[in-house]
Image: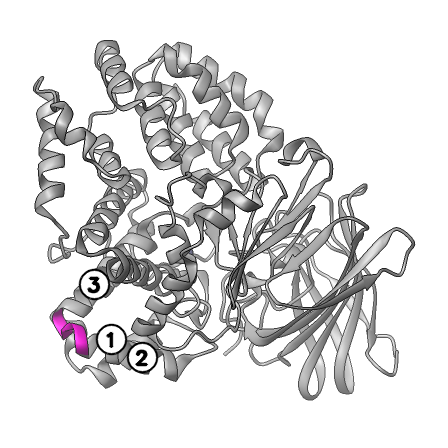
Amino acid sequence: MTRTDPHSYFDDRQPRAHRWHLRLLVDFDSRILGGEATLMFPRPVAGILDLDSKGLAIHRVWVTVSGAKVPFELGPEEPILGRRLRLTLPEATHGVSIAYETSPGAVGLQWLEPAQTEGRRHPFLFSQCQAIHARTLVPCQDSAAARVAYEAEVVVPEGLTAVMSAGPAGDGPGPIPGTRAFQFRMPQPIPSYLLALAVGELESRDLSPRSRVWAEPATVDRAAWEFAGVEAMIAAAERLFGPYDWERFDMLVLPPSFPYGGMENPRMTFLTPTLLAGDRSLVDVVAHELAHSWTGNLVTNATAEHFWLNEGFTVWAERRILEALHGEEAAAAAWAIGQNALAESLERFRDQPELTLLRTRLEGVDPDDAFSSIPYEKGARLVAALEQEAGEGAFLAFLRDYMKRFRFTSITTEQFCAFVEERLPGLLARVDADAWLHRPGMPANAPVFRSARLDRITAMARAWAGGTRPGDDPMGDWNPSELLVFLQNLDRVQSLEDCAWLDRRLGLTARGNYEILAEWLCIAAASAYEPAYPRIREVLARVGRMKYLRPIYAALGRHEATRALAREVFAQASAGYHILARRLIQGVLAKYP
Ligand SMILES: [Zn+2]
């Protein structure tokens, strides 16, 4: 073999680092991380070592211990991969150290001004390395196939706290006056995309002996209330999937510009503050990130071409946890909401059907451009189809075997299929796995998840188009998921009278549940319903979660007046968006007529 990952210079014939030691200084003024990365090898190695790097300034490379200089060479800039950093290691190298700096425009880092935080007094920094942005933080073999344990020392301005996807290992005065040094230790080998760092004015609250939530002081008590049920979730997941293997499950609630709902950084899940609905109605995202501790972080995809193995299994697992905690109705509602996201992604990729396969081919494609609900929702439906065909007991037993066999490794779809064939012969053929994996769109045998209650709600939404309005009673009885299903099943464009009716009856513009609010604002935007414009402005200016930005900006594209509104808001707000969100919305605006 040679290069196994289309998005990395990782070459499996070369030495493979198994541990990193990072020493980093966080400089908010220059927006640079500077320091040293040491890559350790399990045995003495020599020869060529190709690393990934993007935007990194490499100052010096030397053999750890002896200090002997290591020749290095940076290749030309490739738009997706970045620059190959080629080291020539002398005989008997145990470790190699690299002195380097990140660039202020590193895609993997977002630097926030104090005004962009809740407390407005201190700056904030957070990382997001998935899919291939670890190379903008650290020169490394940035392929999920090359797992590493790590230790880190992070030096930050006094008064700020650093957290990482690792266990804390103490803190003390930093090497420079006015700084503090935080130590971390991550003993389990992780794929590079799970490296994570955040720095800010942070406080924590204990939720259980093994879980704690971190957030800015103004947010931390709300977060502790919202996520108080996390221990019950961990226990439910352990009953399904076996013991939790990462010791602690801590969470960090980030400022609102965090571009995702959550990121499953091990030992420190990152979460958007849009989950703080005030009624614990959006904690399914926590169930999702927790489920990654088994399906994903423990066994993950070797490259972005097998992403469904990570996310498909995790969505399925998340819904199994929800079902165990809240019953079948709750799980059915989650599947129904997911169906809607799946339909939108299939529509979005109508002209790129190759991106609707589960097993993708992404040579020359940026994984961020291929990102959609397909690996999540189509993948989860394949897992459900396998479960239904195998039978629940047999499938859960298989799953535990699977996680035992591949724990702390990163695998391909082909390895997965070979293992299924070995343990449950004929199962793949019976669900026509080939169609799921290698053909676009949804197979005809896709499982359907229904409940009588949801059927009544979707029927009401359909009757709405014919002029039938639901009575007060049923609507008052709906939980947030059910209301969301109702809104999702309405046509995007409504008359102004109907918008006013919905808004008045359901109090939509004032909602604090962002799933409902964003769904409503899409309808309001597509319908040019002016009373919602101030709320649209406020949400787009404050929240950077791409799941909401994309559809709201897209819905604003229907009318000239709303297009002008979108462009104006984007001009003001985009400086506060994460670079991935900014790029995404630039793409949406470029498609406006
Ligand atoms: Zn996920």
- Mark 3 closeness class: few <14, some 14–19, many ≥20 residues within 10 Å: many
- Tell me the residue at 17%/64% (across/down): 385
- Tell me the residue at 85%/82% (across/down): 65
Q: Which residues are magenta?
A: 389-393
Q: Is residue 365 left or right of residue 167?
A: left
The image quadrant of residue 95 is: bottom right
- Asked whether mark 3 and ligand 1 are closer than 8 Å, the reply comes as no
Residue 371 percent coordinates (x, y): 41, 49
Disc 3 to disc 1, C-alpha distance: 11 Å
In the structure shown, which secondary structural element does the residue marked by tag 1 occupy? helix
In the structure shown, which secondary structural element does the residue marked by tag 2 occupy? helix
The image quadrant of residue 505 is: top left
Q: Which residue is mark 3?
A: 384
Q: Which residue is mark 1?
A: 396
Vertical order, 551 against 31 (above or below): above
- Label annotation for residue 479: none
In the structure shown, which secondary structural element does the residue marked by tag 3 occupy? helix
Q: Which residue is mark 2?
A: 400
- Asked whether mark 2 and ligand 1 are closer than 8 Å, the reply comes as no
Mark nearest the camera among 3 and 2 is 2
**Residue 306 visible to an observer of this rendering:** no
In the image, what residue type sits under mark 1?
Leu
Vertical order, 170 against 178 (above or below): below
- Mark 2 closeness class: few <14, some 14–19, many ≥20 residues within 10 Å: some
* Quadrant, the C terminus: top left
Vertical order, 553 against 341 (above or below): above
Do labels 1 and 2 touch, CB within 8 Å?
yes
In the image, what residue type sits under mark 2?
Arg
Vertical order, 188 against 445 (above or below): below
Tell me which secondary structure the magenta stretch mostly adopts: helix
